[in-house]
Image (cartoon, grey):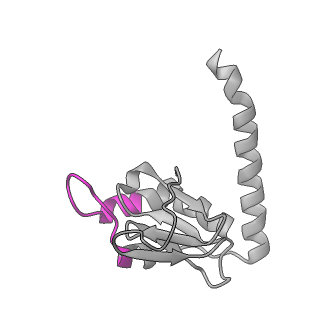
Amino acid sequence: MRRRRKEGAGAAGQRHRFREGQVLYSKLRPYLNKAVIADEDGYCTQEILPLDFGGALSSRYALIFLTSPHFVGYADRLSYGVKMPRLGTRDGRNALVPVPPMAEQERIADRVGEIFRLLDACAPLTRA
């Protein structure tokens, strides 16, 4: 997700405060599959859902789940609006997430990261 910043407390509109390490999920047009782990504290618009899993989920594992075809399909089915469909905050927070033990979450996140690194390494070969 491309990050935009607006400095200072004068940012217009409603805002949500987020903390470093939280997953930020874009409710707007969920089929675009936009989510990121915050690398610093800040504020975001109401179109971004800052998620805190209270230590039950690794942020890296949560990010993988939230960008999975399963969750994207869920979000797409529950979206409302025609021109600018969005996932409701309540629906986003009520999604059922499989919660393996923390060590398994980290193993999954490490393996998925490894696979993406391999895919990135192959990308120049496919552009030739």
Residue numbers of the magenta segment: 73-90
The relative height of residue 51 versus residue 72 in the rendered view (above or below) is below
Taking the view exactly as shown, the residue that stands out farthest to the left is 82
Tell me what residue is drawn at x 21 percent, y 60 percent. Answer: 81
Whether residue 61 is visible, yes or no, is yes
* Residue 81 counted in the magenta span: yes
Count numbered badges in the picture.
Answer: 0
* Residue 89 counted in the magenta span: yes
On the image, the x and y values in percent for residue 45 come to: 41, 68
Q: Choose between 58 and 43: the one closer to the eye.
A: 43
On the image, the x and y values in percent for residue 18 come to: 55, 75
Position of residue 26 in the picture relative to residue 122 (left or right): left
On the image, the x and y values in percent for residue 48 come to: 44, 66
Tell me the quadrant of the picture where the C terminus can be found: top right
Q: Choose between 77 and 90: the one closer to the eye.
A: 90
The relative height of residue 17 versus residue 107 in the rendered view (above or below) is below
Taking the view exactly as shown, the residue that stands out farthest to the top is 128
Whether residue 96 is visible, yes or no, is no
On the image, the x and y values in percent for residue 41 come to: 61, 72
The relative height of residue 117 versus residue 88 in the rendered view (above or below) is above
The relative height of residue 118 versus residue 128 in the rendered view (above or below) is below
Q: Choose between 28 and 77: the one closer to the eye.
A: 28
Q: Choose between 93 and 26: the one closer to the eye.
A: 26
Taking the view exactly as shown, the residue that stands out farthest to the bottom is 54
Tell me what residue is drawn at x 44 percent, y 57 percent. Answer: 72
